[in-house]
Amino acid sequence: MNQEANEKHKDSFFSYVFGNKRAVRELCAALGGKPLPEDAVITMNTLVRVLFMGLANDISFLINGQLIVLIEHQSTINKSMPMRLLRYVVQLYENIVDKEAYYRRGAITIPTPVFIVLYNGTDPYPDS
């Protein structure tokens, strides 16, 4: 299997495993050190084909309508990840903000983004 096909396969598997609410609860508990409350409302909003190359982000969701989480799984170091995450969050806001709000006098309230990149490659890279 070539490198591109292998990376696409890994991305698809990661999205498949963690692309549901039950798995999101487990992932949040593992990353945050404590479980989400049982009554937490999770809304999946993973993007499809955001970038010109047809790439989609791996996982995105809102928790109680207040928090956007963007999780990317990487097996190679990508120093352009901040730019990719910026593109993703802008597209997510475009999807969840009422288009008429842009023309109203009041401020638009948006969820605070949290960006998480899970790296499992072999090259050394700092944890944060």
Image (cartoon, grey):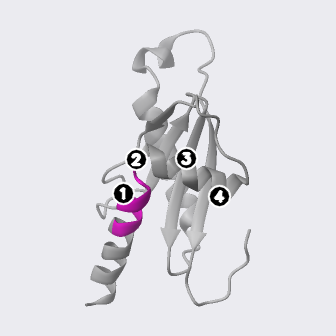
**Split into 4 quadrants, where in the image is the N terminus?**
bottom left
Q: Which residue is mark 2?
A: 46
* Residue 5 among those drawn in magenta: no
Q: Which residue is mark 3?
A: 25
Helix, strand or loop at label 3? It is helix
Residue under the point 55% across and 59% down: 83
Q: Earlier in the sequence, mark 3 or mark 4?
A: 3
The disc placed on residue 30 is 4
**Number of numbered labels in the structure image:** 4
Q: Which residues, given as a range, are shown in magenta? A: 13-20
Q: Nearer the viewer, mark 1 or mark 2?
A: 2
Give the crowd class for mark 1: few <14, some 14-19, many >=20 residues within 10 Å.
Answer: some
Q: Position of residue 18 (x, y in %)?
A: 44, 57
Q: CA distance from mark 3 to mark 4?
A: 9 Å
Q: Nearer the viewer, residue 26 or 111?
A: 26
Q: Which residue is mark 1?
A: 56
The disc placed on residue 15 is none
